[in-house]
Image (cartoon, rainbow, N blue to C red):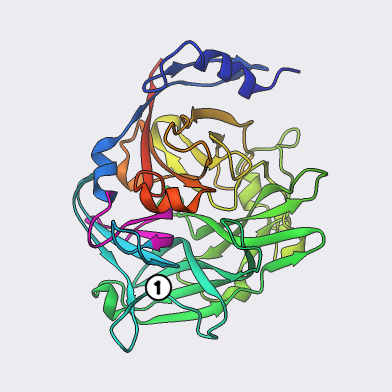
Amino acid sequence: MIRQELIILCLALVVPATQRTWAIELSGVFVPKFTVEKAPELEKWFDASDKWGGADGVFSIPLDEHRLLFTFGDTFTTRQRRKMVNNSIAIMQLEGRTPVDVAFYFGQTTDGEIRSFAVPEDHRGLFWLAAGFRDGDRLHLFAAHIELTPMGGPFGFRQIGEALLTVNNPDDPPPQWHIQQQALPYFRSDDQGTAVMGSAVCVPAEANSQYVYLYGFEEEKTPLFPIKHAIVARVAKGRADHINEWEFYCGPSQLPPNAQPQDFIIRAENWTRDFSRATRLAREVASEYSVSYVPCLQAYVMVYTRLGLSQEIMMRRAPTPVGPWSEALRLYRVPDLPEDQKAFYYAAKAHPALAADDELVISYVANSFDFGRLVRTPEIYRPWFIRVRFVPE
């Protein structure tokens, strides 16, 4: 059977990469038309400067109607790229969905030196900041707990855990934030692979929703490399830091006969507090992705880099935050970087606070196996943005 990615690839060969319109029907499943274009008006806010020099990760979390928090992983502190810390944040000021200002924040040692914004309380390893959400008066952020390994290079690390960081005063300036740290028990790393929560967060569009949905991944070992599958948990609003109350979806991944999509959510037997029973919902996802509601599609959308490291930015649709998830549709192929033949690409995810009702705004990151070139070339290690606009029929 011809895979959907191959059909889209054939279309991509004849349409310019800067703006494409696609519509296909595969196995009776309709895929809407859409265009893709670069978004330099968003990229300019992340240009290297004397206050911030580039980073990866790039998760966005609305703090209120006018403030959008970004969290990052490894970060160069200035455009000169002479120093890197393990995480940073930014707060973007918005008028509607339009940025008007941005401020970047690092941590500070007792000697006044720049350090990572958040560091592990046990002083072991480091944090890479990830997804999060505002929940009433508090802010919750996931943080991958990472330990460096002797092999060095861009993959010289291993994950040793996952933490939930709770900010009790998110309306104060970030240097004044009071942050509580909890190690998540929902982490596994063994001969079978890794399973972890914190890849994405979705606050449902329905005003009467009682829950926040928290996403992660579970690996499947293959002869070549591990394949990541999406998994999901839910927790009642206002209770996210009560980790023992999280419930994991353990029902079917596809809709059974005579069932309705809402059955995924409302059937009590589809939920368990046993992390090991979580259902694998979508294949070939990444360790970081996004799930958000797109009004014009009347659907929840999962956006990710295929296989975690590739030039393919993928999308799946579902009628609920849990599923059932459609087959993957390729939205965009990141173009080659002529200035760096050793570049690789990852971290694709959507930013609904910056998007109109008929579009997705998606960021991604390019990195390099050549660290010297990475330091010399600010264009390589930084957020890039595209707009995916859906065309009405």
Q: Is residue 274 above or below residue 7?
A: below
- Is residue 198 shown left or right of residue 50? right
* Residue 149 location, quadrant: bottom right
Q: Is residue 277 above or below residue 291?
A: below
* Vertical position of residue 143 compared to residue 286: above or below: below
Q: Is residue 109 left or right of residue 12?
A: left
Q: Is residue 60 magenta?
A: yes
Residue 371 drawn at (x, y percent): 48, 53
Q: Is residue 64 visible?
A: no
Q: Is residue 50 visible?
A: yes
Magenta segment boundaries in residue numbering = 47-75
Counting labels gives 1
Q: Nearer the viewer, residue 239 or 153?
A: 153
Quarter of the rendering containing residue 275: bottom right
- The disc labelled 1 sits on which kind of residue? Ser
**Residue 279 located left or right of residue 105:** right
